[in-house]
Every structure is written in C-alpha cells, then in structure tokens.
Amino acid sequence: MPPTELTATFDPKVKIYLVLQVGAILCATFVGVLLVPVWALIGPFWAGAYFPTIRATLTDRALLYEHGIWFRSEMSIPLDKIQDVSLHHGPILDAFGLSTLRIETAGGQPGSAAVLTGVVRAAAFRTAVLERRDAVAHRGGSETLATAAAGATETEVLGEIRDSLIRIERLLAKERA
C-alpha cells in the first residue's frame, strides 16, 4: 500500500491573529511599546509573507511541520514519539474562529513540541494524527516482537532477555571488583 499524506490547511485569519499576538507581546514591555507603531506598519507585510510558509503534512510515519521566512524551521515528528495532541481555544482565538493544536512528544524537551495555530478543521486533523499514531504503535509493537522472536513464543523471548541481563550484571560485577 503506498504511503498516504494528509496536508493541513491553515485559515488565512491566522495572519491577523499573528500580527495582534506580536503587538500584544510588544505592549508588555516599555521598549516594545515604542516599537508598536513600527510593527503596525510592517506586521501585516510580515504576516502576509509568513503565512504561505506554514505547512503541516501528516504521513504514515511522521508529522512534518515547516514555517518561517528568514529563519526556516522544519520539524519531523515521528508518530511513535507523539504523546498527546491537544486542542486549545481562548477568547482571542475564538473571536477569530481559530484554535491551536499542540503536539507533545516524549521527553518534553524544548523544541520537541509543535504548535499549529489556525488549522482548518483542527479537531479532524487531531483525530487523524492520533489514529495514525495508534496504528504505528500497534504495527511497531507486533513487528518488533515478531522480528525478535523469529517464531519463538513470548515466554521464550522474555527468557532470553532475562538471561542476557544476568550476563550483563555478571560482567559489570567483575569490572567493579
């Protein structure tokens, strides 16, 4: 079966949201307040150039996320590493009819999560990500056991693992002595 891709569509209203979001951040500091008029002039142009760079593609193995103008960011998040896909709403997002999908990965390291704001039909995209993640986890688990066992029962494989661990412990004990 050939791999299938599902590409997320982003709502153009996210451009206005991004301009207002950066403007609000600028207003939070004294120096930033001075830059608000400059941002009011260049912000819409930046958002217009930034918006077409946002891409999220769900493949059979990973979620690919790209964005950025001057500093491009490209993430490939393996589906088996995804722990949660949460859907966020808030008063400002709701005013624009937008939502945010947050993809959490194992480990929770900085840069290991993706935040996708403005995905059209975000709940359906979230469901698709979770379904593919579960399919990969199910496939991966059974393939790993089948490959490792090579026809052996689960009890035999666990016995081999136990014996290997015992050998490792003995080797470590000898090195310490």
Image: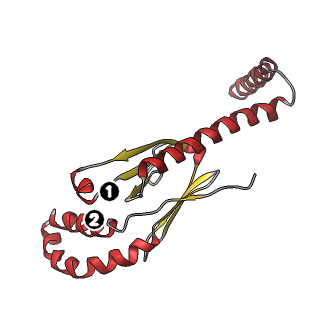
Depth order, front residue of 127/114: 127
Give the CA distance from mark 2 to mark 1.
9 Å
- Determine which quarter of the picture holds residue 166: top right
How is the model colour-coded? secondary structure
Expressed as whole percent of the image width and height from the top left, the position of residue 85 reads 45, 44
Depth order, front residue of 114/49: 49
Report helix, strand or loop for mark 1.
loop
Side of 151 relative to 66 (left or right): right
Residue type at tag 2: Tyr
Q: Nearer the viewer, mark 2 or mark 1?
A: 1
The residue sitting at 42% across, 63% down in the picture is 10
Q: Judge the density around disc 1: few (<14), some (14-19), many (≥20) Cα neighbours within 10 Å.
A: many
Expressed as whole percent of the image width and height from the top left, the position of residue 125 reads 48, 51
The residue sitting at 53% across, 42% down in the picture is 130
Q: Are marks 2 and 1 in contact (CB under 8 Å)?
A: yes
Depth order, front residue of 1/20: 1
Give the quarter of the figure containing the C terminus: top right
Residue 114, label in figure: none
The residue sitting at 56% across, 41% down in the picture is 131
Read off the residue under disc 2. 17
Residue 98, label in figure: 1
The residue sitting at 33% across, 65% down in the picture is 14
Side of 146 relative to 134 (left or right): right
- Determine which quarter of the picture holds residue 31: bottom left
Q: Judge the density around disc 2: few (<14), some (14-19), many (≥20) Cα neighbours within 10 Å.
A: some
Q: Is residue 92 above or below residue 146?
A: below
Q: Is residue 117 above or below residue 159?
A: below
Count up the numbered dots: 2
Residue type at tag 1: Leu
